Amino acid sequence: MLSVALTSFVTGITEPIEYSFLFVAPVLYVVHAVLTGVSMAVTWGLGVHDGFSFSAGPIDYVINWNLATRPWLMIPIGLGFALVYYVIFRFAITRFDLGTPGREPAEDVEDSAKG
């Protein structure tokens, strides 16, 4: 999962991580879709405009800095939404015991040394 997260952050290609929790915890995907829409509404409301060529990752952010309107606001908005995502996802996962990638139930392994 670390390589998927790193790829998602650096390039903005989020499909692998989105699909991984879409199939394991569809409720979280719905929450993600709503939060994504809210984040877009917030940026629009604050007059933040930043185009991207492919995936809206840091590479596109840097390349399009001079073409954007108020691009510096994307950093605090992104950090704020990261906190919101963390709090909501952590609450939902622990409260409703939602399965997520990396939290699969432990399998019972028989000890072959016992005879």
Image (cartoon, rainbow, N blue to C red):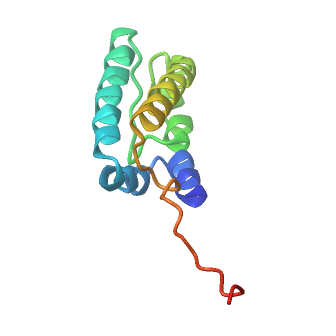
Q: Quadrant of residue 67?
A: top left
Query: Residue, x 39% and y 17% (percent of image)?
Result: 43
View extreme (right): residue: 113
Q: Is residue 81 above or below residue 90?
A: above
Q: Nearer the viewer, residue 4 or 87?
A: 87
Q: Position of residue 40 (x, y in %)?
A: 34, 23
How many marks the image carries: the answer is 0
Q: Position of residue 76 (x, y in %)?
A: 57, 18
View extreme (top): residue: 46
Query: Residue, x 53% and y 62% (percent of image)?
Result: 106
Q: Quadrant of residue 34?
A: top left
Q: Quadrant of the C terminus?
A: bottom right
- The answer to whether 1 appears left or right of 17 in the picture is right
Q: Position of residue 21 (x, y in %)?
A: 38, 50
Query: Residue, x 52% and y 68% (percent of image)?
Result: 107
Q: Quadrant of the N terminus?
A: bottom right
Q: Is residue 84 above or below residue 8?
A: above
Q: Nearer the viewer, residue 19 or 64?
A: 19
View extreme (bottom): residue: 115
Q: Position of residue 98 (x, y in %)?
A: 40, 44
Query: Residue, x 31% and y 17% (percent of image)?
Result: 41
Q: Nearer the viewer, residue 71 or 83?
A: 83
Q: Is residue 35 above or below residue 62?
A: above
